[in-house]
């Protein structure tokens, strides 16, 4: 899920009521189990702000919020295309494909925007580190660290990348 740009949650007629057939959870709805893989994948995508498209298959209807576990309630608020067998099948699938293509293009635009933001942050951070190392004879101040943290937050740089830049600049110094 961490590497996907979109998650399609295929919801069939029995999806909500699938239950364990045996074992310690016999008779319990799978969606109520925090360890259920379908639940984990949907919950993870929603939590990471990955677009989720619930797809209603056949005669399935979107369950109400009350029918979902708390962590999945947002799913009931999303637009859900229907995919029905029969003469409209191809029309339904074509509509879904257009939606996926649009979301992929939007994800690509967002990814490029983030890459540019991070690149600008790396340049600012490099300049800050060079200036701080020169000014303080290799011993940056608390204010320097605070400024570096602010750059990392504003430009969505993770600490691992920031550490690489610091090490690189220290070695060049």
Image: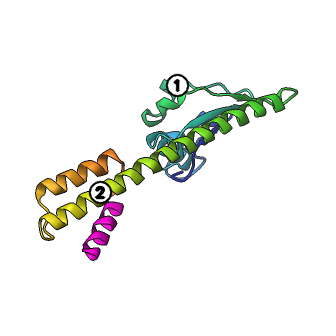
Residue 139 sits in quarter: bottom left
User: Considering only order in the chain, which callout, 2 or 1, is on the residue closer to the N terminus?
Assistant: 1
Magenta part of the protein: which range?
A: 160-173
Q: Nearer the viewer, residue 20 or 128?
A: 128
Image coordinates of residue 4 in percent, x first then y, are 57, 49
Asked whether, in this view, residue 129 is left or right of residue 74, the answer is left
Q: Residue at x 18, y 62 (%)?
A: 132
Residue 89 sits in quarter: top right
Asked whether, in this view, residue 14 is left or right of residue 119, the answer is right
Q: Nearer the viewer, residue 163 or 94?
A: 163
Q: CA distance from mark 1 to mark 2?
A: 41 Å
Q: On residue 125, which mark appears? A: 2
Q: Nearer the viewer, residue 107 or 167?
A: 167
What is the basis of the colouring in this image?
rainbow
The answer, for residue 14, to whether it is visible in the render is: no
Taking the magenta stretch, the answer to whether it contains residue 92 is no
Image coordinates of residue 28 in percent, x first then y, are 52, 41
Please tell me whether residue 87 is drawn above or below residue 26 in the rendered image.
above
Image coordinates of residue 99 in percent, x first then y, are 67, 33
Q: Residue under circle 1?
A: 77
Residue farthest to the bottom, as pictured:
171
Circle 1 packing at 10 Å, graded few (<14), some (14-19), many (20+), is few
The answer, for residue 159, to whether it is visible in the render is: yes
Image coordinates of residue 71 in percent, x first then y, are 44, 36
């Amino acid at each position: 899920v961490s590497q996907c740009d979109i998650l399609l949650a295929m919801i069939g007629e029995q999806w909500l009521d699938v239950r364990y057939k045996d074992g310690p959870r016999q008779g319990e709805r799978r969606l109520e189990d925090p360890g259920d893989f379908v639940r984990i994948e949907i919950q993870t995508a929603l939590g990471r702000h990955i677009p989720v498209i619930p797809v209603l298959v056949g005669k399935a209807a979107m369950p109400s919020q009350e029918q979902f576990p708390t962590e999945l309630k947002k799913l009931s608020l999303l637009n859900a295309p229907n995919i029905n067998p029969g003469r409209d099948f191809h029309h339904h699938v074509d509509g879904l494909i257009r939606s996926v293509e649009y979301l992929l293009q939007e994800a690509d635009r967002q990814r490029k925007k983030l890459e540019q933001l991070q690149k600008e942050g790396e340049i600012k951070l490099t300049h800050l580190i060079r200036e701080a190392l020169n000014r303080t004879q290799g011993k940056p101040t608390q204010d320097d660290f605070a400024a570096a943290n602010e750059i990392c937050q504003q430009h969505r740089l993770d600490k691992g990348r920031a550490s690489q830049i610091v090490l690189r600049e220290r070695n060049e110094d």
